[in-house]
Image (cartoon, helix red, strand yellow):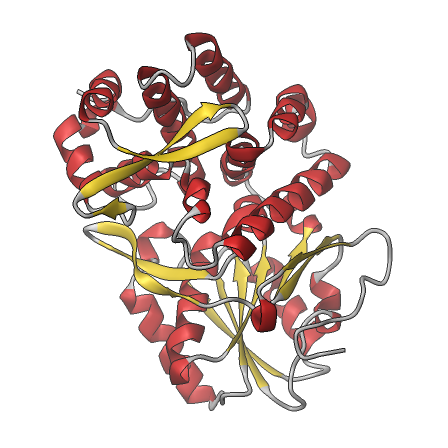
Amino acid sequence: MTDQELATPPDSSIDRVDVDLGERAYPIYAGPGMIDRAADFIKMAPDSRVLIVTNTVVAPFYAERLKTALSCVCRADIQVLPDGEAFKQMAALETIHTRLLATGLGRDGMVVALGGGVIGDIAGFAAATYQRGVGFCQVPTTLLAQVDSSVGGKTGVNHPLGKNMVGAFHQPRSVIADLETLDTLPEREYVAGLAEVLKYGLIGDRVFFDWLAASTDALISRDRQTLRKVVKCSCQTKADIVAADEYDTGQRALLNLGHTFGHAIEAQLGYGAWLHGEAVAAGICMAADVSMRLGFLDAHTCSLIERVIDTLGLPTAPPRHIGRRRARDVMARDKKTTGGQLQLIVLRSIGEAAVVPAEDSALEATLARYFD
């Protein structure tokens, strides 16, 4: 077994997906009871230190359980941060750095993110920047994090002028997704994660999208077998894309379907007013509308996408009071802007996405439809 490899899952209830990045390759494990068996899936140097970074919502459920599980192989401490997107900022990063220094965590240590996408992004950025980079592991506890943000190595914090504008690529050593954590996830958080799941079908897998559209009742009821397939399929799709384009210079941009609009919604409402997945859901509908205006989709297909999103309990439009000009200003600072030209992810069909320069008349028409 090499430094990048871990044991084969011990039983058939655990799925494994590998992110093939050469010497930075790592496994994603998904199954029930993973937190209590975490030491089996995290490769640590003997007697090294671990800092578990979590938040005030997740900590009472899982922090001590994870610490107990890891304590047989390392010295583990816990850092609890406030919950919410509003706290995904530089101050939180400094809090983690201070704790890492205070505990004496060395280059052989590891930061373990226990929580959703916000915790994963902050903890990962702390790991990337502490002593110029230490080990990092993701233990995602939300659906959105399990299917999307925990995979791929994007880390960072928000800035008042833009979401995720300060960060680094820092791949985890492993991702450990305990499906049982979805049982305690608040309904709104759970539903928000379904937006990222739908995204995978829309950008590259029509069969997966059709299955999701036919499985809305099972998705809403959190059927365990349905969720197992959702997590495995979503992680496999993202792993394939990340392996082909680790640093987001080409194909990986497709993963941002709906995000350019969604980030503008989040920034203008104030981070945390809408959950990320809620903003992405509305953003997907807006991206579909632009796609229709560019001649790629017909009205029936746009309506189908909106209907599935609405059936799952997600928003299909942003609050109108944001205003076109403010939304456009935020979008102009998007990371996908190249040479001053905003790039949009559009749908050529369900299951096929593309990156195209924003065509002003189509974009303005969409903004006029959704905003004042």
Q: Residue at coordinates 72% horizontally, 39% vertically from top-left?
A: 229
Up-down relation of residue 246 to residue 163 (above or below): below
- Measured as percent of width and height from the top left, residue 250 is found at 41, 48
Up-down relation of residue 236 to residue 171 (above or below): above
State left or right for residue 236 relative to residue 321: right
Q: Is residue 320 visible?
A: yes
State left or right for residue 160 relative to residue 42: left
Residue 112: image quadrant is bottom right
Outermost residue to the right? 11
Q: Residue at coordinates 65% horizontally, 81% vertically from top-left?
A: 44
Outermost residue to the left? 325
Q: Is residue 173 visible?
A: no
State left or right for residue 287 relative to residue 50: left
Position of the N terminus, as image quadrant, is bottom right
- Measured as percent of width and height from the top left, residue 294 is found at 32, 19
Up-down relation of residue 241 to residue 198 (above or below): below
- Measured as percent of width and height from the top left, residue 199 is found at 51, 34
Task: Out of 157 and 26, give the one closest to the viewer.
Answer: 26
Position of the C terminus, as image quadrant, is top left
Task: Out of 127 and 315, give the one closest to the viewer.
Answer: 127
Task: Out of 98 and 60, give the one closest to the viewer.
Answer: 98
Q: Residue at coordinates 36% horizontally, 51% vertically from top-left?
A: 85
- Measured as percent of width and height from the top left, residue 221 is found at 67, 29
State left or right for residue 224 relative to residue 195: right
Task: Out of 236 and 30, give the one closest to the viewer.
Answer: 236
Q: How many marks?
A: 0
Outermost residue to the top? 300
Residue 366: image quadrant is top left
Up-down relation of residue 300 to residue 136 (above or below): above
